[in-house]
Amino acid sequence: MIEMKDVTKKYPNGVTALRGVDISIKPGEFVYVVGPSGAGKSTFIKLMYREEKPTSGQIVVNGVNLSTLKDKSVPLLRRQIGVVFQDFKLLPTLTVYENVAFAMEVIEESPSAIKKRVMEVLDLVGLKSKARMLPGELSGGEQQRVSIARSIVNQPKVVIADEPTGNLDPDTAWGIMDIFEKINAKGTTLVMATHNKEIVNTIRRRVLAIEDGRIVRDEQRGDYGYEI
Ligand code: ADP
Ligand code: ADP
């Protein structure tokens, strides 16, 4: 599903964010990525959806070799990978419905199929009744649920999230985790960078720890392992 072989990422300013990373994530896995600030977690996530390219090494996602993927094929890759951000990245002038539908409109689906699917995913995240609202009219947790609906509308095999609960209070964060668990239970691979110790230590899943650009721990049902 996701393979990295000897992946190194050096940014143009000379910072080496990842060094010799080897990992393999199987279909349907739920993986937390933990580690101190600046360790390389975001870089690891960005390499998976080709927001950044590795300096060396191989990355394969859903059978697509990102090293040889042409830039013009990146949008096609992105449709197979759902991405969720800490700051939601919703389009502020579009309604909830439109934010989710937007991700589908690029693919050639009929308007009725789009409507059916958008309402289905809004229902899954509990926001069917807010379809006509604008992001600015919603709470942070609701905005994150819209962004999760957008990430899954095209039925990706993989969902990648970079600190999805980072801006949310604890109760709201647990609500977001319920949704991720439902998505993962349907077979979608989930990779989530997080600083949320309580969540990692409660919903036990595979833990990858990154420190100074290296994978220093890879445990099935691991714990968070840091004090904060
Ligand atoms: P984390 O997500 O664990 O906080 P990052 O992947 O964001 O770590 O950053 C890893 C290292 O790479 C840090 O030293 C950071 O400053 C650096 N870095 C991240 N993005 C860039 C960038 N676009 N250009 C240069 N350096 C970067
Ligand atoms: P987070 O801590 O949430 O992982 P960062 O603060 O590391 O996020 O990064 C925020 C943005 O700034 C990212 O797009 C990252 O690529 C970029 N960035 C991070 N560190 C640097 C850096 N040293 N130089 C340039 N861009 C950076």
Image (cartoon, rainbow, N blue to C red):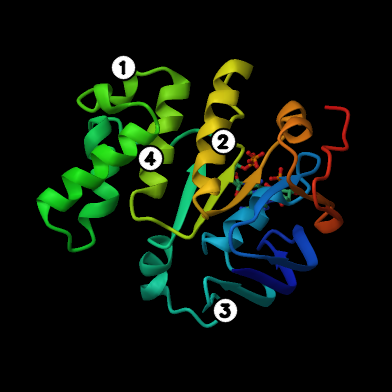
Distance from disc 1 to disc 4, alpha carbons, whole Å, reads 17 Å
Q: Position of residue 145 (x, y in %)?
A: 43, 31
N-terminal label among 3 and 2:
3
Foreground pick, 124 / 153: 124
Q: Which residue is mark 3?
A: 67
Q: Position of residue 14 (x, y in %)?
A: 74, 61
Look at the numbered discs 1 and 4 and tell me whether their residues touch, using CB distance below 8 Å.
no
- Give the position of the N terminus as an image quadrant: bottom right
Distance from disc 4 to disc 2, alpha carbons, whole Å, reads 13 Å
N-terminal label among 3 and 1:
3
N-terminal label among 1 and 4:
1
Distance from disc 3 to disc 4, alpha carbons, whole Å, reads 29 Å
Q: In this image, 193 relative to 187: left or right? A: right
The numbered mark at residue 149 is: 4
Crowding near pointer 3: few (<14 within 10 Å), some, many (20+)? Answer: some
Look at the numbered discs 3 and 2 and tell me whether their residues touch, using CB distance below 8 Å.
no
CB of mark 1 near ligand 2 (< 8 Å): no
Distance from disc 3 to disc 2, alpha carbons, whole Å, reads 27 Å
Name which residue type carries label 2: Pro
Distance from disc 3 to disc 1, alpha carbons, whole Å, reads 41 Å
